Amino acid sequence: MPIGPNFIGLRNIATNGETGKYWAIAAGGVDRTFDAFKIGQITATAVPEPATWALMILGFGAVGTALRSRRAKAAKVGYAF
């Protein structure tokens, strides 16, 4: 797809829900890209793995158990004479 008669700059692409940018150099209406000028920026959504979820839930359970098992200490009152 020609961009114009003369063009040097970034182009956006979107493939299978992923977006990215790369450098394109066009001369005379012919699109030319060079591997030396490409920028590999691809944005993807981060989805935690099941092991990450399991560790997070286990950690929250451990913190909850530790907080629940704490016993209130009786206050000690001392007088200085």
Image (cartoon, rainbow, N blue to C red):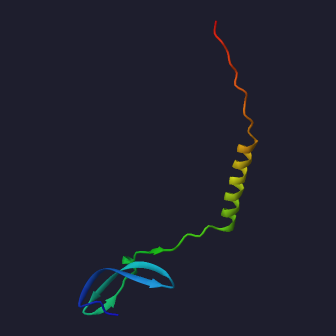
Q: Residue at x 69, y 64 (%)?
A: 51
- 5 relative to 77 in the view: left or right: left
Identify the image quadrant of residue 36. Answer: bottom left
Q: Residue at x 41, y 83 (%)?
A: 13
User: Which sits in the foreground, 22 or 17?
Assistant: 17
Q: Is residue 31 above or below residue 44?
A: below
How far across and how far down the image is residue 15, in percent? 48, 85
User: Which sits in the foreground, 64 or 59?
Assistant: 64
How many labels were placed on the picture?
Answer: 0
- 67 relative to 38 in the view: left or right: right
Q: Is residue 72 above or below residue 14?
A: above
Q: Is residue 45 above or below residue 68?
A: below
Locate the C terminus and report the quarter of the image it occupies.
Answer: top right
Q: Is residue 67 above or below residue 13?
A: above
How far across and how far down the image is residue 70, in percent? 73, 39
User: Which sits in the foreground, 16 or 29?
Assistant: 16
Q: Residue at x 35, y 93 (%)?
A: 1
How far across and how far down the image is residue 43, in percent? 47, 74
